[in-house]
């Protein structure tokens, strides 16, 4: 149901739309994820804090967005994640 297609070098589709909207919500250095990611990494020891719910695509209910806890991404790993988002 959440698929994306590449057309003329651009990613399109519902998954791309939702990902883009989550990324747009992030502040510098933040790593935001959807409930799907939180569920997929259950048991990994990572912690997330709820950042609220947002309508991420037309016609869908609101989705909860989560922030990866900074204390879980120690030092260099957290900085690298922030650097990655800064380059995007």
Image: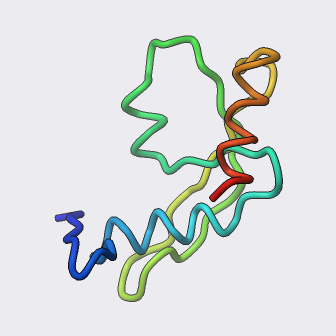
Q: Nearer the viewer, residue 79 or 51?
A: 79
**Residue 58 x, y percent position in the rendering:** 41, 88
Q: Nearer the viewer, residue 64 or 6?
A: 6
What is the basis of the colouring in this image? rainbow
Number of numbered markers = 0
Q: Nearer the viewer, residue 27 or 57?
A: 27
In the rendered view of the protein, which quadrant contains the N terminus? bottom left
- Up-down: is 75 above or below 14? above
**Residue 17 x, y percent position in the rendering:** 41, 74
Q: Is residue 51 left or right of residue 58?
A: right
The residue sitting at the bottom extreme is 58
- Up-down: is 69 above or below 27? above
**Residue 4 x, y percent position in the rendering:** 23, 67
Q: Is residue 34 left or right of residue 15?
A: right
In the rendered view of the protein, which quadrant contains the C terminus? bottom right
**Residue 42 x, y percent position in the rendering:** 44, 22
Q: Determine the residue positioned at 39% across, 44% down.
A: 36
Q: Is residue 14 left or right of residue 20?
A: left
Q: Determine the residue positioned at 50% across, 50% down.
A: 34
Res. 37 image quadrant: top left
Res. 27 image quadrant: bottom right
Q: Is residue 2 left or right of residue 18?
A: left
Q: Determine the residue positioned at 48% across, 35% down.
A: 38
- Up-down: is 73 above or below 51? above
């Amino acid at each position: 149901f959440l698929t994306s297609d590449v057309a003329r070098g651009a990613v399109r589709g519902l998954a791309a739309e939702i990902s883009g909207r989550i990324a747009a919500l992030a502040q510098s250095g933040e790593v935001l994820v959807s409930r799907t990611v939180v569920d997929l990494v259950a048991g990994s020891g990572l912690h997330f804090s709820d950042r609220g719910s947002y309508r991420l695509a037309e016609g869908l209910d609101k989705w909860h967005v989560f922030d990866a806890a900074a204390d879980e991404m120690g030092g260099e790993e957290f900085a690298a994640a922030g650097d990655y988002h800064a380059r995007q």
